Image (cartoon, rainbow, N blue to C red):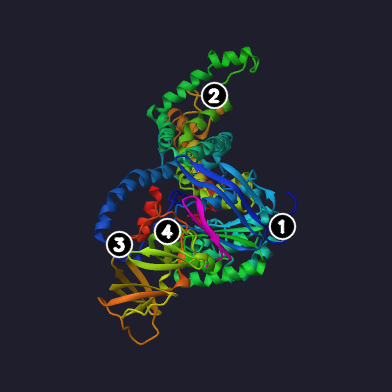
Amino acid sequence: MAFAAFSTTAAPSSSDSIKKKSPVALLLLLPGILYLVLFFLAPLVSLLLTSFKVPAEFGDIGEFSYAFRWENYTDVISAYWPHILRSFGYAITATFFALIISYPLAYFIGVKARRWPLLQSLALVMVVAPFFISFLLRTLAWKQIFSDESFLVTSLKAMSLLAPDAHVTGTAFSVIFGLTYNFIPFMTLPLYTTLERLDVRYLEAGSDLYASPFHVFRKVTIPLSMPGIVAGTLLTFIPAAGDYINASREFLGGTGTQMMGNVIEANFLVLQNFPAGAALSIILMSAILVMVSIYVKKSGTEDLL
Amino acid sequence: MTTDTFAESGADLELVGIHKRFPGFTAIEELNLTIPAGSFFALLGPSGCGKTTTLRLVAGLEAPTAGRILVGGTDVTNQKSFQRPVNTVFQSYALFPHMTVLENVAFGLRRRKMADPLGKAHEVLRLVELDHLASRRPQQLSGGQQQRVALARAIVNRPALLLLDEPLGALDLKLRRQMQLELKTIQEDVGLTFLHVTHDQEEAMTMADTIAVMNKGRIEQMGAPQELYELPRTAFVANFLGQSNLFTGPVVNTTSAGVAVDVAGHKIVVPAARAHRTTGEITIGVRPEKLTLHSTKPTHDADVNVMGPGRVTDVSFSGVSTQYLVEVPGAGTLIVFAQNMTFGSDVKFGDEVWVSWGVGHGFGLDDDPADAPRFEADFDTRSIAAQRHLEGA
């Protein structure tokens, strides 16, 4: 599966231990298997079944009975296709910005700061520091900063950099900004772990072989840090595509910025149209799975591992 | 960048007044060196003597604190490493793990926009007999094969100057010998200037036309291998390049032919032409293979130095020769290499022996014995003590 991209070393499974099927190993695996069956497999099956349900005859709102109504899927796609496209559009844009912000940062911490271990650990702590505050609070704080009466927005308007009737919150900009901001640590940390192990002797060899700093970066540094780039972009893209906090109206979003997470939430909690919500969830999951597997295959990281 | 052309031949390398200081220590102090085009030059020294730093300065991977570097008469001091007509075979090989062997070799050609990089890469891989592995990744090759890929990756660019940073260090002895010969052949074939950094004195002597022995950021002595071996100028060179028996004593008599030194009551003569100092306390020496063992006191001969009697404290047989350690009271322990010309050895452990050598084989060092170590009985730590003493000075 796609998550193979996260493992930096493919653990060589010795065929001997597999053949023996040690009961101790099975016993140790049991809690994990049980947990996955109970809290991942069972809900997944339930979700899949729900997505084909039809409204119960003479039932109340929110009462559904088992059926195989695959039209549920075509219905939600025709109703929500702008949200689906917007979700992936926002997620890809946010992943891109997170990457171009995080890469220089991770390069600085992992390569340039090697000679000063204290600075290195301090910088890492600063990357992780935002986690000490709930991301809901941090996102709300950004809502304040971007609100119409805020110092930032009034100053921008005073300088005529922003139209007098313009808003910052509720726009695509603020949602993508929030996504980027919230996922930067998830991008930076995997990038840091690969760049920290980057052997600078390869860079010297590149330079010795007539490659300018730009070419060394493009031909040596980037390919060698590919595992970190793949891991970081996946850790950002997957949750960002399903995010419903940043795009929600209570936070940085507006009516025109709703993502799939928001409509899934609305279908489950407000409209009580459980089959529609379930079908949307299944679509989101499979779309992410397909995109991620194509991406991992294309980036060719398995060669590097 | 426009299409580049290969260097027609090797280029001179000139280092003028190079200093290199790192925070906290001086790696190189005042280095002046000229390496003529087309020569195979070895920079020999123990680890930490500044030889690798010298190489990195030439490659452009470090900048000198002071001084100038000229390649083929052009000042390259301010050029970046990718602008210099120099290639390096790194000690760690530094082959790009994400590229095939072929792409590794073609890397420099592609960057210089040479025509037909892959064809040229194949050609060089055939030269190092690795063309059949061109599509492999470097980590799928053995150490010796990686070493040859690293060499191919550098020489394919036909640099005016090729730098070798102990590239044979990781190889086993047999492969090492083979690669030494191959390197020498390649150097003669392509006519490039090679600058080889190594701590292996045998490697340096087999391969290089000229050797510079480096110690503590300075060049101790420079010359052809035989010259350095036969006439070392300092105790460091005498012991780093092979082994030596060194004695210190006052000069008792100087004639045009020789300098006589009193070593623990023995009068030892060194040819005046082979002595760097002729007055006061001096250190003289002789190579172990020049010594002959006698079980009776040899008759007096003006052309032969005799030391003894001493006692054999160790005999070790090594096939071609046998190494004896002879303890001579007052003069310390002497090492003697004797060719195994006769069947069995007639000198045994504990025997009383005399040691002699032709006057012409001795040499006198330039070191001031006040600074230089006076070698005492403890043979095993001799060279360690010598270095420690020099460090303290």
* C-alpha distance separating marks 2 and 4: 93 Å
- Which is closer to the viewer, label 1 or label 4? 4
Q: Which residue is mark 1?
A: B114
Question: Residue sitting at 53 percent across and 44 percent down?
Answer: B20
Chain letter, disc 1 residue:
B
Question: Residue sitting at 38 percent across and 68 percent down?
Answer: B267
- Which is closer to the viewer, label 2 or label 4? 4
Q: Residue furthest bottom?
A: B343
Question: Residue sitting at 37 percent across and 43 percent down?
Answer: A43
In the figure, is residue B114 to the left or right of A178?
Answer: right
Q: Quadrant of residue B157?
A: bottom right
Q: Dots 3 and 4: beta carbons under 8 Å?
A: no
Q: Dots 3 and 2: beta carbons under 8 Å?
A: no
- Of mark 1 and mark 4, the one earlier in the sequence is 1
* C-alpha distance separating marks 2 and 1: 56 Å
Q: Secondary structure at mark 3?
A: loop
Say what amino acid the circle numbered 4 marks: Ile
Residue A254: give its label.
Answer: 2
Q: Which residue is mark 3?
A: B378
In this rendering, the answer to whether A221 lies above or below B209 is above
Say what amino acid the circle numbered 3 marks: Asp
Does residue A61 show up? no
Tell me if residue B221 is in the magenta stretch. Answer: yes
Q: Secondary structure at mark 4?
A: strand
Chain letter, disc 4 residue:
B
- Which is closer to the viewer, label 3 or label 2? 3
Tell me if residue B57 is in the magenta stretch. Answer: no
